Image: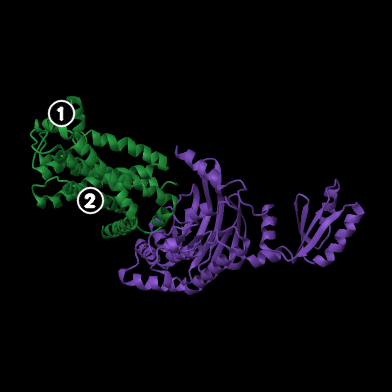
Chain colours: A green, B purple
Amino acid sequence: MNSLMYDTYTIFWRELKRYKKSRSGVLIRLIQPAIWIIVIGNTFSGTQPLIQSVGFEGQYIEFMAPGVIILTAIFTSIFGGVNTLWDRRYGFMNKALTSPISRSAIALGKMSAISLIAALQASLILGIALAIGVSFPNPIMIAPIMAIVILFSLGFSGISVMIAATAKSQETFWGVINFLGMPLFMLSPALFPLELLPDWLASVAKLNPVTYTVLLVREMMTGVSEGGVSALLSIVVISVFVLVMVGLASYVFTREVNKPF
Amino acid sequence: MYSIETKSLSKSFGDVKAVDDISFYVESGEIFGFLGPNGAGKSTTMMILTTLLKPTSGHALVSGFDVRRNPKQVREKIGYVQQETTVDEYLTGRENLLLQARLNHIPKDQIDSRIDEVLELIELSDKQNEPVVTYSGGMRKRLDIAGGLLHRPKVLFLDEPTVGLDIQTRRKIWEYIKKIHEEFEMTIFLTTHYMEEADQLCDRIGIIDGGKIQIIDSPQNMKSAMGNEVISLSIENTESEKLFLSELEKIELINKINQDQNKIILFASKGTEVIPKIFQISSDLKIKIISISLTQPTLDDVFISYTGHEIREEEGGFNRRREHAKMKRLRA
């Protein structure tokens, strides 16, 4: 157990080192969510009456800002596993596989690094949101919000690592990721409240872990609870999602890297 | 106990036999080399010994542990330096070694001193805090090799350690490998398709071609078994070529005859006495000799005599691209 933690940290350390050295990438990845929050947030400002009808008092941009924070977390973490493919192509994976560290530690180290990076990116978006006037009733909530974002991203990094370990090419990886990422984001109350969705879409959205994360983070940011989902239920759903994904990802990763690349 | 021991080791990818019934051993402290063209099965064998691939059949023991049954124990005993350089470009030299040290569970209080030691050995101490992006190809390779021996493995695997490097750098790497071997007294198993490399470094060589070991011996023995001298001659195309060859075979001083198109290679014990006899036969048969030369045998000649062809890239029954395509199909 001790050695699993040590090995996980070794990989975690390496991934973060690599992230730190690629500073240009940090900014590039912020452009898209910044555009979302500025352009979509202002374009749809006329929809305020719609969101007021479900009990939300503020501006539309305050309603959707938590959604964009989650968007950042989704995409940063689901893209994050791609370097698994590089590692297999350029030999780092073989180096790690012939050392005494366990295979799951490689997967866990990658996942934890990705989720921390995702949370860092998301916190930058939170900063942008605050800068353009999204208000925050209680600054004490920033730490728990970040904790939820880290937890949630861990689940998505699991999906990413799993796909990267199974995919043998970049093309396959990006294909699957794009197929998954956008629909999961759209099928959630990130941009519009669940109450406004047709029943069948709302039911589908309720199967999506993104839905619970958005609702929880929005409640923490604005103080308004919606959709009849309690914070406790959201935390339970997110935790189960994360546990399943982390377990599944370490299993799939271990199985796949033992096959020749 | 041998450092490496294999019994009837085989690895197939679909219907391609990459490694075909290989049995050999490597003595503790020895530098042992696999010499063969690309696609001969060298890297596949190494990947089995380093626990990256499971053999299709047969056994392999590394440092006393079965690669199939006790891969974890094997991994604790080995260092593996891959063909392509695998250092992280954006990390500094020292950070790369730190990563390697942690991967191999070097005790925390020894990490710094071990890194200093290998940096000194490969003469990279003054560049250690610069990112690897700024290193030359040879420096990266040295760093990679340093990473492989940081934890003082019992067996160090070097897969084509100097491929793609210029000749000066190659010589330099050879010096480092010799130095490492003296300093740490570890067993080194390397693969190469450079004759000179095998000749310079190895105590014993296994010539491998088409997934099979053709012969294992010391480079010295291999060369002297060829006879003391090598006579190469080329003749004009003629129908009496077969007759010519059979006449040559009757010369007692000739140990072995190899033919590759118009080129005939003779391994003889007293070359200077053989040459007049060759001219005698050729004038009897009215065969025109275009050129003739007398040289000392090299490993090249040894290789040709066992495989019937020179070391060439992208030939032989098995090459990397086909191997890759095969693996791809297998997975689909």
Residue that numbered label 2 is attached to:
A124
- Residue A82: tell me if it is visible: yes
**B35 is higher (above) or lower (below) than A223:** below
Residue at mark 1 shares a chain with residue at mark 2: yes
What SS does tag 1 mark? helix
Quote the CA–CA distance across marks 1 and 2: 30 Å
Q: Give me the residue at 73% from left, 66% from top.
A: B296
Q: How many marks?
A: 2
Q: Quadrant of residue B264?
A: bottom right
- Category of crowding for the residue at label 1, using alpha-carbon neighbours closer than 10 angstroms: few (below 14), some (14–19), many (at least 20): some
Q: Are marks 1 and 2 in contact (CB under 8 Å)?
A: no
Q: Considering the numbered disc 2 on the image, is that residue within a helix, a strand or a loop?
A: helix
Say the numbered circle drawn on residue B132.
none
Residue A176: image quadrant is top left
Question: From this viewpoint, is residue A237 visible?
Answer: no
Is A145 in front, or is B262?
Answer: A145
Residue hosting label 1: A196
Is the residue A69 above or below the residue B292 in the image? above
Q: Position of residue B42 (x, y in %)?
A: 55, 54
Lower position in the chain sequence, tag 1 or tag 2 = 2
Residue in front for this viewpoint, A230 or B53:
A230
* Occupied quadrant, residue B232: bottom right
Please name whichever residue, A208 or B50, is drawn nearer the observer in this view of the structure.
A208
The residue type indicated by label 2 comes to Leu
> Mark 2, residues whose alpha carbon is within 10 Å: few (<14), some, or many (≥20)?
some
Residue A179: percent from left, percent from top = 33, 35
The chain holding disc 2 is: A
Q: Does B73 sit left or right of B267 as displayed? A: left
Q: Is residue B119 left or right of residue B160?
A: left
Which circle, 1 or 2, is nearer the viewer? 2
Identify residue type, mark 1.
Leu
Tell me where residue B303 appears, x and y as whole percent: 66, 57
